[in-house]
Amino acid sequence: MELVLAYDHRTSLATTRGAAALDFAANLFRRPVSFRGRVKDPILLRQLLLALHQGILSDARWSDPDVLRRTLDPVITVHPDQLCFEAFSNDQSSYLRVAAPLSAFEVEGEVRYGTTNIDFNAGLRDALASLRSSRRTLFRVGAGGFGVSTTVGADTQDHFERKVDVPDEWVKGFMQVQGALAMRPFVFDARPADLLTAIAYFQDNKPPSLPHGLRFEFQPDAPIAIALEPWERRFPLR
């Protein structure tokens, strides 16, 4: 399935000594969506968006020359309860979702609810690193120019389009995710160090056979364990 995305400007982050403006360009071919607000915790937003960007680019396949052609801009939903980003990794193995309650922002102006794609370009990663808690950070989703009290260069109107070949598996994946989100979740705590150990092993070892995957194992009176397939290596979550 071929998806056409159109934007009237590039997503940008402009910063000065006392202010920052993060402006996400929305897909013009979708119903208009708009949101504007001051971010209460810019450092947390920076960490979450950098993790989302890294997850989208991730690919555990060891060779595929067409990977970058299939990178799909994330979907953003502005809802009365929350604002969330959704995407899949390049290898389609991971579903990524970053959600923030609207209470994480000091909302300004009219909010137009809905769902659209947003331009999530490569240059945004380096720009996000400049977010600081000492700066007043404005967050905006929607078409058109954007400005703060200081000079912000996000008013360019260079309309551009790009076509993305969306695999059928991605469409199926979104449907499966929506079904899973409607189910009652099983929630448990895990130390970051334990998760990083499993991730490092996966990144450093080429799978001897395909497919590869991750499995959670539950045993009575024992910590939950992560099992990596096809190595069958287990990592306890203490």
Image (cartoon, helix red, strand yellow):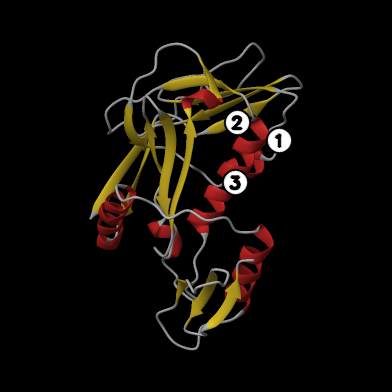
Could you tell which of marks 3 and 2 lies nearer the N-terminus? 2
Kind of residue at disc 1: Ser
Asked whether the residues under the numbered discs 1 and 2 touch, taking CB atoms below 8 Å apart as contact, a structural biologist would say: yes
- The residue at the point 65 percent across, 16 percent down is 151
Closer to the camera in the image, 7 or 43:
43
Dot 3 amino acid type? Leu
Give 183 or 203, whichever is nearer the viewer.
183
Residue sticking out furthest to the front: 221
Residue type for callout 2: Leu
Q: CA distance from mark 3 to mark 2?
A: 13 Å
* Label annotation for residue 50: 3
- In the picture shown, does residue 228 fall above or below 180? below
Dot 2 corresponds to which residue? 13
Q: Residues within 10 Å of mark 1 (few under 14, many from 20)?
A: some
Give the percent coordinates (x, y) of residue 1: 23, 55
- Badge 1 is on which residue? 130
